[in-house]
Amino acid sequence: MLVLVVLAAVAAVVLVVRDTRGPGSTPAAAPTSASAAAATTSPPAPTAPASTAPPPAPPPAPATPTFDRAGQSIDDPNSTWVVVNKARPLAPIDHAPADLVTIAGGYQLRAEAARAMTDMLAAAAAEGLGITVQSAYRSYDYQVGLFGNQVARFGQTQAEVQVARPGFSEHQTGLAADVGGGGCDIESCFATTVEGQWVAANGPRFGYVVRYPDGRQDVTGFKYEPWHVRYVGVALATELQRTGVPTLEEFFGLPPAPGYTS
């Protein structure tokens, strides 16, 4: 009898629970991780439109300084840029430099040119090259005797190709020298020696250039003299090398001087 009473009570509880859910009700589903993530995800940020402006231009390259070709006189015999040739004698014609100093071998050059020559020969020696000075400053009177001897030996025409008239010689400026080495002194073969090639390539670092280059006799008035170097200062010498202009006449826009005008 007791068992029946308990079963009746349980059945009554079940009926009450069903009634409280209401007809057609279903259990609530547990939230999933996907739905939770969707509820907390922010909407995407708007995309900025692509720029149509051109990219900024690169900064301009620094301008190469313009060489001032009027920086020194080409007429003043005391200027390191003085141009002396068969159409441009020294003025006065018997000019003598006031600052001559003696260098190795007992030769003389103007002080600035002498220092540069000493440095150049030392640099060559440091590379195992023996370059020596064979001639340098020549006075007006010395050139009178030298030119006269050449005329006596070869005649006027040939002498004027090989030696300048007095007053028309670069040697008289105290800025020119004849150098030699490698078994060749004051001859065209100097150009084929290591020493001669070194002078042509490195001379500008010390302010020296080969004054009478090959193929320019119609401009300078003198045949190729790879041994004859002229001091013009480092600035002008390196500018001549940089531009590839072979002669002072062409660099300064002077007329060719293949021969004397009188």
Image (spheres, rainbow, N blue to C red):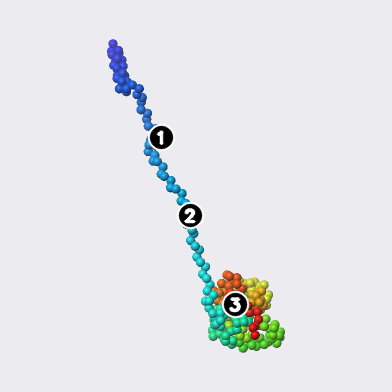
Q: Judging from the image, what secondary structure is the residue with disc 2 in?
A: loop
Relative depth, front residue between 207 and 181? 207
Dot in front, 1 or 3 = 3
Residue drawn where x is 37% and y is 30% of the image: 30
Residue 54: mark: 2
Q: Of the residues under marks 2 and 1, which one precedes in the sequence?
A: 1
According to the picture, the residue beneath numbered tag 3 turns out to be 254
Circle 1 residues within 10 Å: few <14, some 14–19, many ≥20: few
**Total marks placed:** 3
Relative depth, front residue between 173 and 5? 173
Alpha-carbon span between mark 2 and mark 1:
45 Å
According to the picture, the residue beneath numbered tag 1 turns out to be 34
Alpha-carbon span between mark 1 and mark 3:
92 Å
Instruction: Answer above or below: position of 123 versus 97.
Output: above
Relative depth, front residue between 84 and 119? 84
In the figure, is residue 107 to the left or right of 152?
A: left
Q: Judging from the image, what secondary structure is the residue with disc 3 in?
A: loop
On-image quarter of the C terminus:
bottom right
In the figure, is residue 81 to the left or right of 161?
A: left
Q: Judging from the image, what secondary structure is the residue with disc 1 in?
A: helix
- Pinpoint residue 200: horizontal percent, then vertical percent: 62, 73
